[in-house]
């Protein structure tokens, strides 16, 4: 009879995996935020106007969209570890390459390639976290895997505070070298667990993926999941990109607005990790209902409170927590919506829908401001979006599970062995 693995060894392996997921997400969050905080320095050095940066940001978004959709599907057929390692290495290498590009066109090309790697990493991180734990820790693992993203974004903002805008290329060098340093650790320590469908041919492409996503009673849940990702990520990226500007427009000083932005990231990271842990407990349904209800209330407070720095900084901390808690709920729902043999495909498609939201959010805010709306009106314009996302999450809790059978949040994360 095989000897039992010591508890200490299991805990050590679990801690190591969590650290690797966290570092991968940290690098992704840093790189995504670095593009935004480098914008001012790019405008000065390249002598372009801010509107010209649309090509730069748009190229990243398109790469993220394609990478998310393709990365998960390929991983279902070839294994999650090789796809994750290649994705992390690719976005590190191309982020490093970005720092050497002499003009906006080449910068956009490098960012498109960076986006492909970034897009392929996140669905596989979440899928591996889901598949690496028992029923009682799956959502905690998802939270750990996602936890690094807001921390990475906050680190990029903090680093940008200490370096002059003319040194914007250094952000991409840091953002490129860090994931390249992690790759050897991923190769050595990340388990090469193949999914049920890993032996299938890559030639089985779009038609098979469509059948998987919409067949066997999954159509409504898939579409609902896509809409949830779109609305949740739209909200997050609108606030990530525009919150400092909106707060200064409301009367805060630049320094206070930067503190509020840091509070948004810190509050989001801490509360999101706590939300993930609660999803594995008997309080999961209560925590979801509270998260759905709190977000619109905090958003209204951020829009209407007087421009008193302590109050608004505390409010943005709670706002970050509510927004990121909702992100964890959405990712947990996505991870449990499909059987293991197609989890990468399902998550990749859902994350791709979220990437569309990440493009739409900043554009929505820009359009509202261009039409003469105030900062308060822009924040209030998010209210129907977060309410709509809450409705979607409520419906997701009552639709089919990985096999299209009824499921509620009370049994979220239970066995999902493929019955196909």
Image (cartoon, rainbow, N blue to C red):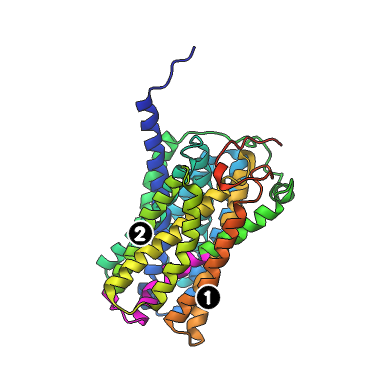
Q: Earlier in the sequence, mark 1 or mark 2?
A: 2
Which residue does the numbered mark 2 point to in the structure image?
Answer: 267
Number of marks: 2
Q: Residue at x 37, y 31 (%)?
A: 11
The quadrant of the picture occupied by the C terminus is: top right
Q: Is residue 95 visible?
A: yes
**Residue 336 found in image quarter:** top right
**Residue 10 found in image quarter:** top left
Alpha carbon separation for disc pair 1 and 2: 24 Å
For residue 399, above or below residue 79: below
Residues shaded magenta: 234-255
Q: Residue at x 58, y 66 (%)?
A: 388
Packing grade of label 1 (10 A; few <14, some 14-19, many >=20) is: some
- Which numbered circle lies on residue 105? none
| Residue 246: in magenta span | yes
The residue nearer to you, when weighing 245 against 98, is: 245
**Residue 52: x %, y % from top left:** 48, 78
Q: Are marks 1 and 2 in contact (CB under 8 Å)?
A: no
Under circle 1, the secondary element is helix
Q: Residue at x 51, y 39 (%)?
A: 81
Q: Is residue 100 visible?
A: no
- Which numbered circle lies on residue 364? 1
Q: Residue at x 40, y 65 (%)?
A: 319
**Residue 66: x %, y % from top left:** 59, 57
**Residue 416: x %, y % from top left:** 61, 37
| Residue 192: in magenta span | no
For residue 358, above or below residue 49: above
Magenta stretch, overall SS: helix
């Amino acid at each position: 009879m095989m000897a039992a693995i010591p508890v200490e060894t299991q805990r050590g392996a679990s801690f190591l995996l969590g650290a690797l997921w966290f570092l991968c997400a940290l690098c992704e969050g840093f790189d995504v935020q670095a593009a935004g905080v480098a914008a001012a320095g790019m405008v000065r050095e390249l002598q372009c106007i801010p509107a010209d940066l649309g090509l730069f940001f748009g190229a990243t978004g398109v790469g993220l969209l394609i990478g998310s959709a393709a990365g998960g599907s390929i991983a279902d057929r070839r294994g999650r570890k090789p796809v994750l390692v290649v994705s992390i290495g690719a976005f590190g290498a191309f982020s490093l390459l970005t720092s050497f590009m002499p003009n906006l066109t080449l910068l956009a090309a490098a960012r498109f390639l960076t986006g492909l790697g970034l897009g392929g990493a996140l669905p596989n991180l979440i899928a591996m976290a889901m598949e690496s734990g028992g029923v009682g820790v799956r959502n905690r693992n998802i939270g750990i895997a996602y936890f690094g993203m807001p921390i990475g974004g906050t680190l990029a903002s903090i680093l940008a505070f200490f370096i002059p805008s003319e040194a914007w290329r250094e952000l991409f060098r840091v953002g490129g070298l860090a994931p390249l340093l992690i790759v050897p650790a991923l190769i050595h320590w990340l388990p090469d667990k193949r999914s049920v469908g890993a032996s299938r041919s890559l030639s089985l492409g779009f038609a098979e993926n469509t059948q998987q996503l919409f067949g066997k009673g999954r159509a409504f849940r898939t579409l609902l999941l896509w809409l949830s990702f779109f609305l949740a990520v739209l909200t997050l990226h609108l606030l990530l990109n525009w919150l400092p500007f909106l707060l200064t427009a409301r009367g805060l000083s630049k320094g206070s607005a930067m503190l509020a932005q840091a509070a948004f990231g810190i509050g989001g990271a801490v509360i999101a990790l706590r939300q993930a842990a609660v999803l594995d407990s008997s309080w999961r349904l209560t925590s979801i209902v509270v998260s759905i209800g709190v977000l619109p209330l905090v958003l209204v407070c951020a829009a209407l409170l007087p421009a008193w720095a302590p109050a608004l900084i505390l409010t943005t901390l709670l706002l970050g927590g509510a927004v990121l808690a909702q992100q964890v709920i959405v990712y947990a729902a996505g991870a449990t919506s499909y059987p293991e043999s197609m989890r990468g495909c399902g998550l990749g498609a859902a994350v791709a829908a979220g990437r569309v939201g990440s493009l739409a959010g900043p554009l929505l805010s820009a359009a509202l401001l261009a039409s003469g709306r105030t900062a308060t009106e822009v924040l209030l314009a998010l209210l129907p979006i977060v309410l709509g996302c809450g409705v979607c999450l409520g419906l997701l809790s009552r639709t089919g599970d990985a096999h299209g059978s009824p499921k509620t949040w009370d049994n979220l994360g239970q066995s999902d062995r493929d019955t196909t």
